[in-house]
Amino acid sequence: MHKRWRNLASITIALVYSVGCAGCEMAERDIQQSIVELELARPATSREAIWIQVHAGALPRGTEIRVSTSKGVLLGTVSPFGGPQGPEAVTYIIPLPQTALVGNRVQLRLEVDEPGAPVRAPRSGEVESINLIHVPISH
Amino acid sequence: MRHHPLRHYISVCALDTCKILQVSGNVISLSNRNYLTAITIERRRLWCYPPSALLKSQFPGVGNNRGVSGKITHSRLAQTGSTGVETGARDFFPNHNEVFLSKNTELQPSTLSRRAFLKTAAAAAATVGSATLPFSSLHAQETAKYRRLNILNPDARRNIESYKKAIRAMLALPPTDPRNWYRIALTHTMDCPHGNWWFLVWHRGYIGWFEQICRELSGDPRFALPYWDWSENTDPANPFRPSVPAIMFDDVLTPSNPAYIAQFREFRVRFGDALAKASYWKRSYKPNGEFDDATQYGQLLARGIRAPEDLWFDIIDDPRGQFFFDLAHARGLTKEEPALDEKTAKAVSLQTLLDALAPRDFLTFGSPKTMGHSGLTGFGVLEGQPHNRVHNCVGGIFTNPSGKTTNSGGFMQANLSPIDPLFFLHHANIDRLWDVWVRKQQARGYPVLPEGSDLDVWSSEPFLFFVDSKGRPVTKRIAGDYATIGDFNYDYQQGSGEQVVPMTLAEPASGAVAAAQAERFIAQISQSSIGTTEPAIGAVTIPSALLQAGMQPEAPTLFAQVTIALPPLAHGHDFAVLVNAPAGAAKIDPSSPYYAGTLSMFGHHVVHGPVTFTIPLSGALAAMQAGNLLKANAPVNIQVVREQVAAPGVAAIHAMGAKAEVLSIVVEAH
């Protein structure tokens, strides 16, 4: 598997791909999942939230990217709508619960839901980058 | 007798359920659904409050079952939803002439300012631990001429019937009439912005003019669009399960009704000629001979539509996905299975909504900047999560609980989505949330629009396709014309998310809350061991004033400190903290109002002793407040349960035999 990741300023991203253990149920599952680990450059202040910013490439109609914690708790969905997307990546913002951050780190699971196909990991170009952003909030 | 004329400015308070029941002479009878109602007059506006929080010393007579006085009565008729009364004084005073309140010995305009009233009431409530604080929003919506109601509100029934009439009338109009149902939908196809900072403002104009057309063609001059509050938990006794309102499967409220065009071929035949001859394709030039981009045709070119054939290609021939769906696939969700899927339930959950409303600037709240409104750059939370996912789910892109995704088709998934009447209720809710955010921003002194030079760019973007109730091009032709609700003159029945608008939390109450910050509330543990399916359970009594204050801005945040003894090498053990969850709750995820957080071990360290986790409770408590799941003066039940791994096809991972035990639960306010 090969992926293209970019724009990772101030963010550490570690991809965990499991491609071994053929015949092992765990391996099959992991092949269908990408786990990314993100680290905050600095903690959020009391007037900031930490959100996830996904730069997604063009996805076929009906195809979505599910963003969950590494344990599978759903956080949000990259769900395109509108006209067909051009060649440029489009950003999607997904709120991240404070409790998902442990020691300024979070592990996220990215899975692609595609009509009529098994759940799979993102393919090249479908997720161009993912990072954490500090968002000024009013409470 | 002294009278107080209220010229033009009668405003029923923002306790949304308040209703004028009767006007007889100079007596106005008021009620809301649950409380007796008192009124005050200030700044020539009429305000009403639940009298349970009024100070009897200030308002003699309040608090008994006869209302404020013999002149101002109360009724519980509205509770039944069968009164047929209308909200909004203007319905009763259509000419906006003088309205007289009888002289009331206790309620004079200058007796007590509204702010002072709220201060004293808040202080009283905090002092006595009242379960009811009378906070009306400082930035409550002014009473408008039209009120958009939650579609589940019984009072919305008349609007729904008028909506049906309007739809039938629009379906029957010739294709040459720009108010024809499909022509209106095509306006969306040709001009809608998505994934950019004009998303909100364009759709405000679009549904605002649509509402006026409905008013005209239904013959109902009081018509206002209902909204679909997807985040409302209609069954608080059970886990949040949002669904398409049942009424939206009736008659012409579903695009599957035979009144709609059954097949694309017929659509093309009926509309091909009208579209080709429409004004969209007119080429206009500036005096210097340059093509004028600020024309309908210029806007079409900006999104790659050069000629009618390009439009038809998008609608049906684009291999990336068509816009038109035959009758059998006009809507993905059905009357038999109207529920949104898990991803959509998460997207419309109250927590996601509150997150979406949290940003302090327009660009983060809305969506990012682009050069023109046909550009697609990115999606803020409001557009990208609830907006997009509801469109796609209703439009048939559905992931079932086992993780299988299907696309059964449906107009809502693409740019002909306004063919589905649910579109306008969906976008009315989006627009309502924009209004909620604006009032929150105003109350806190934050900007409500793009700032600096951005505002000029944003405001001057041309919106050239809207037509009025007579089908004429409108004169409001730029985005800035729709920056406020303005002449559309509607407001909203309050709904999900309203709690982010600051309420009046007066100094005395703040003082009371501040005093509580140092307090700690220790839970009584009734079950300490965490079994495979059995939770640890604790109950903690938190003063109701503190719970109520938790809904206010600047109020302290409540945290639960959970100390738990884990077995060594406890990796893979996650525990969810639940608040007031029903017994045997099988699946609690962050979209549930009962979910507070997860205790998660991270890393590969060895656990040698008890570990204390801090879990914010305010979010869960706010969700429960919204769902009326908190009982006054009742202990708050906190459970710690083993968390199930929710990934499709993945079984929960438990280290069998491992013991975990909750040693203490302490709630603190910070």
Image: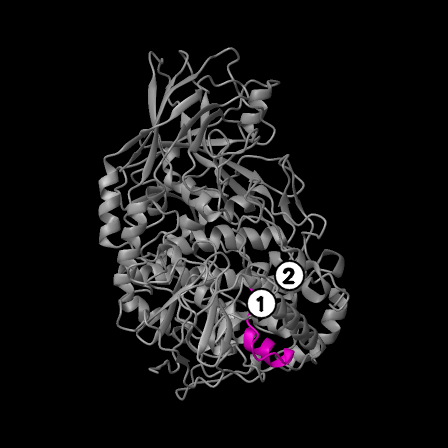
Locate residue B659 relative to residue A8 in the image: left or right.
right
Q: How is the image coloured?
A: one colour
Q: Nearer the viewer, residue A88 or B234?
A: B234
Q: Amino acid at mark 2?
A: Phe
How far apart, in angstroms, are the residues tagged by discs 2 and 1? 9 Å
User: Would you say the residues marked 2 and 1 are in contact, meaning their CB atoms lie under 8 Å apart?
Assistant: yes
Residue B323, numbered circle = 2
**Image-quadrant location for residue B614:** top left
Ranked by sequence position, the earlier of labels 2 and 1 is 1
Report the quarter where the N terminus of chain B lies: bottom left
What's drawn in magenta, residue-wise? B211-227
Is B218 covered by the magenta stretch? yes
Q: Residue furthest bottom?
A: B287
Q: How many marks?
A: 2
Q: Residue at x 47, y 86 (%)?
A: B95
Q: Are marks 2 and 1 on the same chain?
A: yes
The chain letter under disc 2 is B
- Answer whether residue B636 is visible to the viewer in this image: yes
Q: Amino acid at mark 1?
A: Thr
Q: Position of residue B364 (x, y in %)?
A: 36, 55
The residue wearing badge 1 is B189
Locate residue B204 relative to residue B455 in the image: left or right.
right
Q: Is residue A63 above or below residue B420?
A: above
Q: Position of residue B231 (x, y in %)?
A: 52, 51
Report the quarter where the C terminus of chain B lies: top left
Q: Is residue B593 above or below residue A91?
A: above
